[in-house]
Amino acid sequence: MRTVSDLKILESGTIKGFTDHQLSLKLMEMGCIPGTEVVLELVAPLGDPLAIRVAGYHLSLRKEEAASIIIEG
């Protein structure tokens, strides 16, 4: 099982699901819908937060939030 936090910079994947139901509602409101492509754009110098591109815009997530987004590809 791969998550967004496992991606390398400029690597992409398709959102498959979530590991945390409560957090998944917040993430889906921000555009992280299953079936949507996500690309890791930037990682802060200390590794947290991560900047991703999803649904046509940039989104900043904490590493623990990114780790709850299951991807394929």
Image: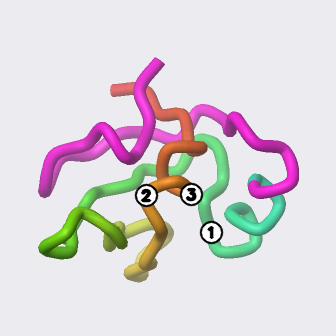
Q: Which residue is mark 2?
A: 63
Verify whether residue 6 appears in magenta: yes
| Residue 42, image quadrant | bottom left
7 w.r.t. 45: above or below: above
Left or right of 1 on screen, residue 52: left
Mark 3 and 2 residues: CB-CB less than 8 Å, in contact? yes
Q: Position of residue 10 (x, y in %)?
A: 13, 56
Label 3: state its secondary structure.
helix
Q: Amino acid at mark 1?
A: Gly
Q: Position of residue 25 (x, y in %)?
A: 83, 60
List the single residue furthest toward the front: 46
Q: Nearer the viewer, mark 3 or mark 1?
A: 3
Give the mark nearest the N terminus, 3 or 1: 1
Q: Position of residue 21 (x, y in %)?
A: 84, 44
Q: Nearer the viewer, residue 53 or 26?
A: 26
| Mark 1 residue crowding within 10 angstroms, few (<14) / some (14–19) / many (20+) | some
| Residue 2, image quadrant | top left
Q: Quadrant of the C terminus?
A: top left
Mark 3–mark 1 distance (CA, rounded to whole Å): 14 Å
Q: Residue 65: which numbered mark, if any?
A: 3
Tell me which segment is drawn in magenta: 1-23
Verify whether residue 16 appears in magenta: yes
Q: Position of residue 3 (x, y in %)?
A: 44, 36
- Identified at 13% across, 73% down, the residue is 45
| Mark 2 residue crowding within 10 angstroms, few (<14) / some (14–19) / many (20+) | some
- Identified at 62% across, 69% down, the residue is 31
Q: Nearer the viewer, residue 40 or 35?
A: 40
Look at the image and name its color scheme: rainbow
Q: Residue 31: which numbered mark, if any?
A: 1
Q: Amino acid at mark 2?
A: Lys
Q: Nearer the viewer, mark 1 or mark 2?
A: 2
| Residue 12, image quadrant | top left
